[in-house]
Amino acid sequence: MSYDIRLMKLVTGELVIGKYQEATDSLTEVAAIQTIPAQQGVQMMMLPYGYPFEPDFTGTLDGKFFLYRYANTPKELQDKYIEASTNLTVAGGLGKLQFGNASNVSSPSGLITN
């Protein structure tokens, strides 16, 4: 079964990921993404949106609360979301993060393109 997993920024400034429902313009099984400063840069942490009071990935966010809709959700982030929300491990294909056209990449991390 394939899900339309999307990354959104809410009007509150929070970054969230979840299963997009086009019919209702909403995200279900929502997770909050938080950045944590580390010695080597920044790490990302994914938690159920209702954590600590709701430890499972439940709930729905309506589209009227989306401030920004990211055009692409990185495959690696989608895989981590699936693993966190289902307790299953995604096998194979866990490559580097790539945004846009891979032939246009001008930085080693693949995050900045021409």
Image: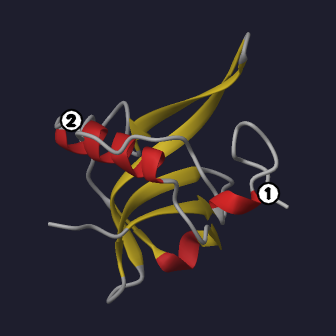
Residue 75 vs 45, above or below: the answer is below
| Spot occupied by residue 91 in the image (x, y as percentages of width and height) | 23, 39
Q: CA distance from mark 1 to mark 2?
A: 30 Å
| Spot occupied by residue 101 in the image (x, y as percentages of width and height) | 66, 65
Residue 111 vs 39, above or below: the answer is below
| Label 2 sits on residue | 89
Q: Could you tell me if residue 54 is visible in this image?
A: no
Say whether marks 1 and 2 touch (CB < 8 Å). no
Depth check: give the residue in front, 54 or 107.
107
> Which numbered dot is residue 113?
1
User: Badge 1: few (under 14), some or many (20 or more) residues near its Cα, within 10 Å?
Assistant: some
Depth check: give the residue in front, 28 or 52.
28
Residue under the image location 79 percent in, 57 percent down: 113
Q: How is the model colour-coded? A: secondary structure
| Spot occupied by residue 100 in the image (x, y as percentages of width and height) | 66, 65
Q: Amino acid at mark 2?
A: Thr
